[in-house]
Amino acid sequence: SGQGVIAWDAVVDWRQVHYEIRKGVLWDTAMPLGQTRELSYPVGTDGTYMVKAVAGGAYSDNPTQVVVDGSGRLVANVLATYDEAGLGWPGSLDGSACVEEGYVTLSDPAVPGRYVIPAEHIVQLDTPALCTVSVDYLLYGNGIHDDMYGVPDVYAIFDLYGGYGQYIHATVRIDTMRDGEWTGWRNFVPGSYYAEQYRLCIDISSDRADVAPILTEFAFAVDVPDRTERRDNLVVPASGLTVVFDTQFNVTPSVVCQIVGAVGGEDVELTGLSKTRCVIRIKNASGTYAARTINYIAQGY
C-alpha cells in the first residue's frame, strides 16, 4: 500500500506508559502526529520523526529519532521528482501563505495558507497508469514574539520557551486526472494512484495567532512499475508483421523476439518501434526475408 511504519523499543516504567510521535528535527518545534500505547506508528511521508514516552504526564528526557528516506521502496521507473524548496518555491500561494527567507510561512498565522506546485511540475502520462507517489516535507513552529526585547509586555507571552510544534499543522493533498477531468483535492495517503496526471499541494495552519508554521521542505516523486506485454507463437509472414500493442506505452518499450525453431544465420529485424507499435521481419542467412513463428515480449511503462 506504500504506508510506512516506524517502530521503537518499549520503555519500562511502573506507571502506565504511552508514546507521542512528532515530525521534525527538534522536539519543541516539531509537529505532533499522535499518541499510542503500541510500539509502532504509521507514517505518511518521508522525513525525520521523534518519539517520546509519556508516563504520569511527564515526558522522557530524550526522544528516539527515526529517519524515513524511502530507500526501501521498490522504485521501478521514476517519472518525475521535484524539490519545491530547492527550486525556490515556484508554485502558487493561497490564503496568507507567503515566502520569506526561502521558506513558506503565513503572513497572518490566524489565516491558513496553501502552496500548490506549478503547472510545469504536474506529472503527465500519455496513458493512465498505476503510479506510486511519495512525499517529503518538514514543518516547524516559530513564535512571532521570540525576540523578547521587541515585545512591550514579555509576561503577556504565553510560552517563552518554545514548544510551538503542538500548535501547527500541515496536510498534503493530491489531485489526479482521469479521462481529462481532475477528481478534486483529497488528503494524500502514501501508495499508488491510477491516473494520467498528478499534482500536489500542502496546506499549513496554526492554532495560535502568535505562532507561525515554517515550511522548509516539500518534495515529491512519482514512479511506475514496468508493464510487460507478451505474445507467443506469432506468425510473421515474409512481408513482415505490424504489431499493435494492446495498450499504448508511455515510453517507447524494449522489444525482444525469439524465433521458434530458428536455424543458423536467421535474424530479427525490428523497425518502426514506437509507443504504440512495431514492425517485425525475419531475415535468413542468405539475406532474404522468410516467414517464421516468433515469441515476443515488449517491456516499458
Image (spheres, rainbow, N blue to C red):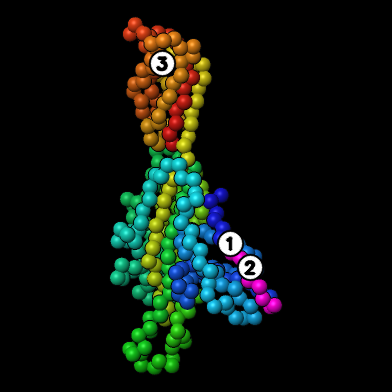
Q: Is residue 226 magenta?
A: no
**Location of residue 60 by image quarter:** bottom right
Image vertical order of residue 180 relative to residue 22, above or below: above
| Quarter occupied by the C terminus | top left
Image vertical order of residue 76 relative to residue 12, above or below: above
Q: Are marks 3 and 2 in contact (CB under 8 Å)?
A: no
**Location of residue 288 by image quarter:** top left
Q: Main secondary structure of the magenta part?
A: loop
Q: Amino acid at mark 2?
A: Ala
Magenta-colored span = 7-15
In the image, is 63 to the left or to the right of 139? Answer: right
Residue 46 appears anywhere in the view:
yes
Of residues 71 and 132, which is closer to you in this image?
A: 71
Q: Amino acid at mark 1?
A: Ala
Instruction: Identify residue for label 3.
Output: 241
Q: Is residue 12 magenta?
A: yes
SS for tag 1?
strand
Of residues 269 and 249, which is closer to you in this image?
A: 269
Image vertical order of residue 57 relative to residue 176, above or below: below
Q: Residue at x 48, y 28 (%)?
A: 229
Q: Amino acid at mark 3?
A: Leu
**Location of residue 19 by image quarter:** bottom right
Of residues 49 and 85, which is closer to you in this image?
A: 49
Query: Spatial distance from mark 2 to mark 1, Cα to Cα?
Result: 10 Å
Q: Position of residue 196 (x, y in %)?
A: 43, 43
SS for tag 3?
strand
Instruction: Identify residue for label 2.
Output: 10
Instruction: Identify residue for label 1.
Output: 7
Please name which of the two marks, 1 or 3, marks the residue nearer to the observer. 1
